[in-house]
Amino acid sequence: MKKKVLSILVDNSAGVLSRVSGLFSRRGYNIDSLTVGETENPAFSRMTVVARGDDQILDQIKKQLEKLEDVREVKELEDGKSVTRELVLITIGVSPEKRGEITSLAEIFRANIVDVEVDSVMVEITGNQRKISAFISLLDNYEIIELVRTGIAGLGRGKESFDDDMSD
């Protein structure tokens, strides 16, 4: 199965998220990741959706999204032609004696310690999925108490953007 990251420009109005996610659920497609937020123009929001499937399914998803009334444009964010990031917060159970190991690991990955308790630390890490996965895999010898991921947000590289008429 392939993974596709879609950047979807939509009207910033009530019910848009429900209609987009409903398209996926009605057709039995799974969403791996979904982020949404207002753009530089408050009339529009940008959704970043990650889905998996074969070429036919992924092409069908894109075509169906383009047919939705609130959708202004759908673009695939391709590796090398886009920048994607994700934010992850991880609470790690760790004794004060081993806290330095987590701090060192966080420094190597440019992560931040955002909370410290007697028996745990919370780490914030931002980056692409490879970086995040590499960091999490190095925590195998520690107790991960909680972990939350924001989902991928991304934009195409350079000045190429969505249609110019959307920036009015």
Image (cartoon, grey):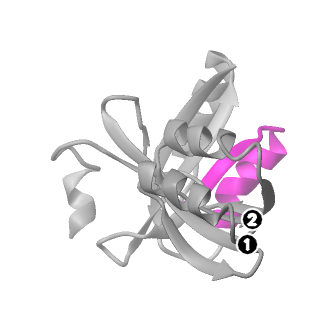
Q: How far across and how far down the image is residue 83, in percent?
A: 35, 43
Say above or below: 33 vs 113: above
Count residues near mark 1 (Cα–Cα under 10 Å), then give few for <14, some for 14-19, many for 20+: some
Q: How far across and how far down the image is residue 2, in percent?
A: 63, 21
Say above or below: 90 vs 138: below
Of labels 1 and 2, earlier in sequence is 2
Q: Total of numbered circles in the picture?
A: 2
Is residue 18 covered in magenta?
A: yes
Q: Which residues are magenta?
A: 17-35
Q: Quick check: 31 left or right of 70? A: right
| Residue at numbered disc 2 | 94
Q: Which quadrant of the structure image shows residue 1?
A: top right
SS type, badge 2: loop
Residue at (59% x, 65% y) in the render:
123
Q: How far across and how far down the image is residue 20, in percent?
A: 65, 55
Q: Return the residue found at the far left.
A: 159
Q: Which quadrant of the structure image shows residue 19?
A: bottom right
Residue at (75% x, 42% y) in the render:
140
Q: Determine contact: label 1, label 2, CB under 8 Å.
A: yes
Q: Quick check: 55 left or right of 73? A: right
Q: Which mark is residue 120?
A: 1
* Quadrant housing the C terminus: bottom left
Three-letter code, disc 2: Val
Residue 72 appearing in the image: no
Q: Return the residue found at the far front.
A: 97
Residue 74 appearing in the image: yes
Three-letter code, disc 1: Ser
Residue at (68% x, 30% y) in the render:
52
Q: Nearer the viewer, residue 157 or 122?
A: 122
Separation (CA) of disc 1 from disc 2: 5 Å
